Image (tube, rainbow, N blue to C red):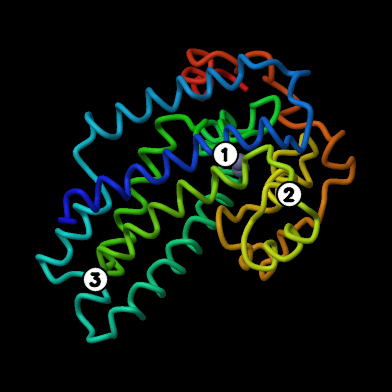
């Protein structure tokens, strides 16, 4: 298998897992989503398609091309020091995960960033389609932030590929409405954010919303005391979304203009 077909396989993998989770969550649902209707899921997917076209075809920047550029110019920690490749990969993936934790905290604490991030939280419920419900401006800012980190780290190409896979697969998994046996959930959440962990972050209760920021590793929430074990109202009966603006942020056009409206 040559490099091009390997990369094609790698980029197809997240999409296959996304579709698999869509099927699995409908077969083994954690919560009854019928109350809030199917329309929200379709609009989340429309926004995903819009963002995909924007980031794939209109913005000439990827993390892989950034890592290649840093390598060619010998920039960043791991392009300057002689570290074993495996160590550079592991450290880079963990540091990037840590940086995304703080990015997520910032999107909740800084009003300008919250205006964009609230589009993600305005979803009336949470399932795998919520994982791709992000305002395009938030994604572009996030891309610039990650590109800067990739340069500073001198991130190995393999680490960038692994991180990008985790950045898609992790949220697809932990936003899914998939019922997971309690024992499996308990074992997984020692290491990663499970759907039950991330659901508390989508609670309408602001105190719960300001916890469980981790998108893949759960360590940072535990270490920085932003971890909530379970939502007080229970997973099946808790309210998800925002107290305000819920009804105004349902269609894709409403999601796109939401950051520019007075809150
Ligand atoms: Zn959030
Ligand atoms: Zn989320």
Q: Of the two numbered discs 3 and 1 on the same chain, state the one appearing first in sequence.
A: 1
Circle 2 packing at 10 Å, graded few (<14), some (14-19), many (20+), is some
Q: Of the two numbered discs 3 and 2 on the same chain, state the one appearing first in sequence.
A: 3
The residue shown at (53%, 51%) is 170
Circle 2 SS class: loop
Quadrant the C terminus occupies: top right
Mark 1 sits on what residue? 21
Q: Is residue 93 above or below residue 230?
A: below
46 or 60, which lies in front? 46
Cβ–Cβ under 8 Å for marks 3 and 2: no
Circle 3 SS class: loop
Q: Is residue 139 above or below residue 228?
A: above
Mark 2 sits on what residue? 180
Circle 1 packing at 10 Å, graded few (<14), some (14-19), many (20+), is many
Would you identify the image quadrant in which residue 156 lies?
Answer: bottom left
Give how far apart the Cα atoms at labels 2 and 1 are: 12 Å
Q: Position of residue 154 (x, y in %)?
A: 25, 69
Q: Position of residue 220 (x, y in %)?
A: 61, 66
Circle 1 SS class: helix
Circle 3 packing at 10 Å, graded few (<14), some (14-19), many (20+), is some
Would you identify the image quadrant in which residue 151 lies?
Answer: bottom left
Quadrant the N terminus occupies: bottom left
Residue found at the very far left of the displayed protein: 72
Q: Which mark is residue 76?
A: 3
Would you identify the image quadrant in which residue 233 lies?
Answer: top right
Judge left or right: residue 250 versus residue 87. right
């Amino acid at each position: 298998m040559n490099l091009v077909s390997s990369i094609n396989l790698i980029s197809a993998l997240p999409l296959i897992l996304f579709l698999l989770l869509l099927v699995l969550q409908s077969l083994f649902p954690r919560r009854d989503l019928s109350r809030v209707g199917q329309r929200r899921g379709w609009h989340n997917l429309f926004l995903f398609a819009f963002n995909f076209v924007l980031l794939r075809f209109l913005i000439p920047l990827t993390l892989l091309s950034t890592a290649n550029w840093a390598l060619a110019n010998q920039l960043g920690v791991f392009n300057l020091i002689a570290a074993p490749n495996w160590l550079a990969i592991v450290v880079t993936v963990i540091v990037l995960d840590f940086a995304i934790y703080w990015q997520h905290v910032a999107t909740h604490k800084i009003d300008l960033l919250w205006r964009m991030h609230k589009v993600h939280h305005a979803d009336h419920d949470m399932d795998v389609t919520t994982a791709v419900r992000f305002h395009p401006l938030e994604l572009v800012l996030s891309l610039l932030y990650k590109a800067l980190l990739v340069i500073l780290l001198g991130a190995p190409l393999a680490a960038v590929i692994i991180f990008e896979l985790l950045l898609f697969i992790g949220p697809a998994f932990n936003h899914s409405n998939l019922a997971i046996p309690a024992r499996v959930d308990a074992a997984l959440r020692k290491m990663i954010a499970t759907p039950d962990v991330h659901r508390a972050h989508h609670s309408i209760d602001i105190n719960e919303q300001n916890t469980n920021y981790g998108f893949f590793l759960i360590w940072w929430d535990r270490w920085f005391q932003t971890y909530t074990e379970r939502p007080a109202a229970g997973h099946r009966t808790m309210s998800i979304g925002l107290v305000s603006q819920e009804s105004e942020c349902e269609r894709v056009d409403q999601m796109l203009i939401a950051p520019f409206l007075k809150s």
